Amino acid sequence: MKYDLNSNQISLQITLLNSDLEISGSERNDLEIDFSDLRKNAADEIFDISFEDSILKLSQKSKKLSQFINGEDYPVRVLLPKTIVADVKLNEISGDVKISGIEALKGEVNTKSGDISINEIADSEANISSISGDIYISAKKGSLICSSVSGDIKADEIECSKVKIKSVSGDINLDCSFSLIDDAVLGTVSGDIAVNFKKYSGDNSITFKSISGNIELTGSKPAEEKIYISNVKGDFSNFNQFDKIFKGSFGSVFKNLKDHIKNVSDESSTSEIRETKDNNIQSILEMVAHDKITVEEAEKLIKAIK
């Protein structure tokens, strides 16, 4: 399935239920959507697809899912010119997302459980979030605006202009240069933070916040007055600013953690937690994402079933 392009910019609005997604650039002038694992003409039965005014809209039809593919995973590949600037809106994706080989990436990339891999990008400015998948970013330059409930967040090579990273239980690992145009913040509830500074320039500061994880800083670190470290170690009273800094995909999860430290008082919530102990970690994380339980309650449950 191919479409002619008359611009070096494109908007990709993609929603997938359970399929992996790959977006990649190459030596080409057109847009191609590849469903290599589907029989001929099956794509129209499973996906709604339209392309007009440099806007690609692709979504998976839930009502067709059980009839045609029985819940199986059928990868979707979007092939683009390597010089393209892609403004993406990727939502409700449970499979893996891989984006590579294009000039610039903007917009939002959100997954429920799949991993996100972004590499060989000249300029990455997208907001990246995942509930339980890992996030990996490698680009020449750009921003690191990332959030994860359970997965790890890793970035290397990139020269960062903006950094706003939050995680509940995953680790944060950066091996990057920093030329900040704004103050940076990295925060995690129970994961570790490790940052290797290849270089650091500019007058902006960088703040690290962790409740129970370790913080390790190496390399060409900025001057001491530009680094702020807060290891709360169980004292949530100093975490009030976390929500003010992060307003993103998991806003309700990170809403003033102090307010979330409370016992479950009603019987239905208690019952819900008891049932969750017999389910997998994914179920717990989805409850956090939908504000059914607090971050602290989820952390205790995950530790209990490991």
Image (cartoon, rainbow, N blue to C red):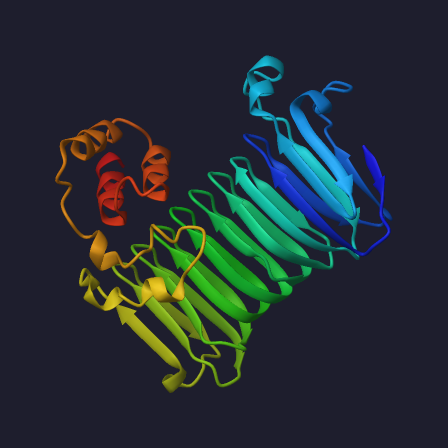
Question: Would residue 38 be found to the left or right of residue 235 on screen?
Answer: right
Q: Residue furthest top?
A: 67
The quarter of the picture where residue 214 lies is: bottom left
The residue drawn where x is 60% and y is 62% is 125
Q: Residue furthest front?
A: 53
Residue 32, x across and y down, in percent? 79, 38
The residue drawn where x is 42% and y is 86% is 223
Residue 184, x across and y down, in percent? 45, 72
Seen in the picture, residue 176 relative to 256 is either above or below; the reply is: below
Question: Would residue 138 be found to the left or right of residue 10 on screen?
Answer: left
Seen in the picture, residue 175 relative to 136 is either above or below; the reply is: below
The quarter of the picture where residue 179 lies is: bottom right
Between residue 64 and residue 187, name the one nearer to us: 64
Q: Quadrant of the C terminus?
A: top left
Residue 82, x across and y down, in percent? 78, 54
The quarter of the picture where residue 105 lies is: bottom right
The residue drawn where x is 49% and y is 73% is 197
Between residue 147 and residue 36, name the one nearer to us: 147
Q: Quadrant of the N terminus?
A: top right
The residue drawn where x is 79% and y is 57% is 83
Residue 92, x across and y down, in percent? 52, 38
Seen in the picture, residue 131 relative to 245 is either above or below; the reply is: above
Question: Would residue 238 be found to the left or right of residue 43 on screen?
Answer: left
Question: Would residue 144 be found to the left or right of residue 227 on screen?
Answer: right
Q: Number of numbered discs present?
A: 0
